[in-house]
Amino acid sequence: MKSYQVVDFGKPLELREYENPQPKGSEILVKISACGVCHSDLHLADGYFDLGDGNRITLADRGTKLPFTPGHEITGTVVAIGEDAKDVKLGDTGIVFPWIGCGVCEACVEGNETLCEAPKYLGARLNGGYSDHIIVPDSKYLVSYGSMDPATAAPYACSGLTAFSALKKIPVASSNDWIVIIGAGGVGINGILLSPAIHKAKILVIDNDPEKRQKAIEAGAEKAFSPDDKEEIRNVLGIGAKAAIDFVGRPETTDFGLSLVKKGGIVIVVGLYGGSLKLSLPLVPMRSVTLRGSYVGELRELKELVEVIKQGNTKLISVKKQALETANQAMSDLRAGKVNGRIVLIPN
């Protein structure tokens, strides 16, 4: 088994070779077909998330052991099955749901594994998809993608699921409403593409990069602006948007989102860029606004999303296939903002 692993936080990934692991109990061994490269992988490789004001969450403090293999947007084929695995057979293909909890706490029992306080996320706590094989803890985490190209399907384990779950947290919007999407990277583009499956609202996109703004229009956004175009944005929105989704997650982007929603509006923070927000507390009740977070999505939502895609009415995000050996370059390109759509790594 060839795996590109974080050996030292903040350093390039290193190729390590191991014997293929053997599944036990309810586990399955999946031969990886594709793995998307996500912005979260950069934070995981760096070893921390920036909380602002000089504070950090480190992976070491959260139980991540080195070396580990990043990557959580995984598709593949079952090649070995543990003795207790159910409803699975050799040759089955699917998207691997990576947001796995401890399995026994209240959140996990209720199917809200992303709310687990002791998660076992693939590509963070457990080895992930920058590899040619992966152990999946239970066959229930393999979601069939039907006839889709596995490279096209891979980003829906995170990028697509994250956008879908965030959109579902917005009260149903009508054709007269606006939803603002801040950040037109891979997750933001998925937000634009998936929005019509949930809402009738018009989409207004805000991004610094003119090329990404153009991609947003091509994906179906009604309008796309630079954050500097404040007057034009406000003229379009009138009294304000029903909701804003911040796919960047910086203080200035979340603050901008709060300024653009109307009374009773909701701002959903998805991005993990980092920092801390200063908030005018009286305006929260006076405007009856909601500020909430959304972190990826649940297994039931991935299944729902896949069914939406299978209906054939949703335009899918573009992917760029690259060899697994290019993992470090792919991460560098993503860090530099050079990626439109999604890079997907393909093992040999």
Image (cartoon, helix red, strand yellow):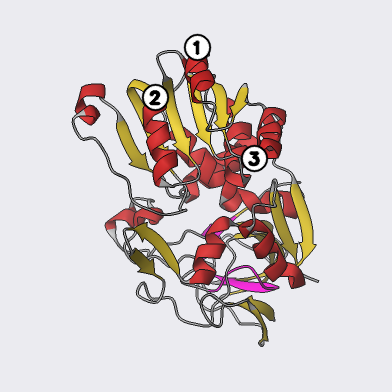
SS under mark 2: strand
Label 1 element class:
loop
Farthest residue toward the right? 348
Which residue is labeled 1 in the image? 176
Dot 1 surroundings within 10 Å: few (below 14), some, or many (20 or more)? few
Q: Residue 184: percent from the left, percent from the top?
A: 60, 39
Labelled disc at residue 310: none
Residue kind at label 2, given as amino acid type: Val
Q: Split into 4 quadrants, where in the image is the N terminus? A: bottom right
Report if residue 80 is visible in the image. Answer: no
Residue 52 shown in magenta: no
User: Which quarter shows the C terminus?
Assistant: bottom right
Q: Nearer the viewer, mark 3 or mark 2?
A: 3
Residue that badge 3 annotates = 209
Q: Which residue is mark 2?
A: 261
Give the secondary structure at mark 3.
loop
Residue in the foreground of this view, choosing between 264 and 104? 264
